[in-house]
Amino acid sequence: MKRFYDTVAFGQVEGGWQVTLDGRRLKTVKGAQQIVPSAALAKKLAAEWDVQGEKLDPALFPLRDTTDYAIDVVTADIAAQAEKVVAFGDTDTLLYRADPDEHLYAKQQEVWEPLVTAFEAREGITMVRVSGIIHKAQSGESLDKLRTRLEGMSGFELAGLESMTSLTASLIIALSAADAGTEAEAIELWRAASLEEEWQADLWGRDLEAEDRRTKRQSDFLKAWEFIRAARI
């Protein structure tokens, strides 16, 4: 699609902030007013439109897409989305370790265990660790506490968190990243989530396409982190 506007701006409106193109207020893909909770997020959304060239590139609209999802889907049913995300807590990657006699196990203990322990302390819960691939359910009490935490988030925060959780298969990583104060901290958490992939790549060799996919997923993870940070008032 050709660029159809000249001027990008954003301003405060009833209920939050909104981007305008040549003075026209933006809507979501489903036709709702695209009103966001903070000037910081509105500024970033405006920048996505402003950076476009003569033809619009959909790949340059990650924050817009997450915003539309937050408004059209997540905010419409916070409880359903919280239930979807909390399911990752029951099969969290960081809780599934190699067998203790494997070299990978020691690395997982070194990198993952401090993150899990800190997470448990912050959330006031206990998580079950597993060696091997046989599923062991987490306690209903722990999952209930995590569900309550998620239900207390805004639709914007939960949309960003869902993206980070699905990218890492880890609610522990996603919630830890949501609380991270700097991008450097978020990157370290992404690296922790990628431990097994990196271990296998070092062991068996690196594939260019796989490396490109990992780079893209890291970029998506950091965009979701950026979205959460910007959406908070």
Image: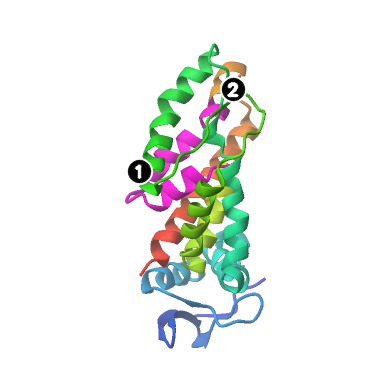
Residue 184: give its label. Answer: 1
Q: Residue 174 or 221: which is nearer the viewer?
A: 174
Q: Position of residue 230 (x, y in %)?
A: 40, 64
* Crowd class of label 2 (few under 14; some 14 to 19; many from 20; radius 10 Å): few
In the picture of the structure, the residue carrying the numbered disc 2 is 200
Q: Which residue is painted at 54% across and 40% down in the image? A: 215
Where are the magenta residues, as a range?
A: 169-198
Magenta-colored stretch includes residue 190? yes
Q: Name the residue furthest top.
A: 101
Quadrant where the C terminus sits is bottom left
* Crowd class of label 1 (few under 14; some 14 to 19; many from 20; radius 10 Å): few
Q: Amino acid at mark 1?
A: Ala
Horizontal arrangement in the rendering, residue 21 relative to residue 38 (left or right):
right
Q: Quadrant of residue 214?
A: top right
Q: Earlier in the sequence, mark 2 or mark 1?
A: 1
Q: Residue 164 or 98: which is nearer the viewer?
A: 98
Q: Is residue 57 visible?
A: no
Q: Main secondary structure of the magenta part?
A: helix
Q: Amino acid at mark 2?
A: Gln
Magenta-colored stretch includes residue 116? no
Q: Is residue 136 above or below residue 131?
A: below
Q: Secondary structure at mark 1?
A: helix
Q: Which residue is painted at 51% across and 61% down in the image? A: 158
Q: Position of residue 152 (x, y in %)?
A: 46, 65
Quadrant where the N terminus sits is bottom right
Q: State the CA–CA distance, disc 2 to disc 1.
A: 24 Å
Q: Is residue 10 above or below residue 175?
A: below
Q: Is residue 221 visible?
A: yes
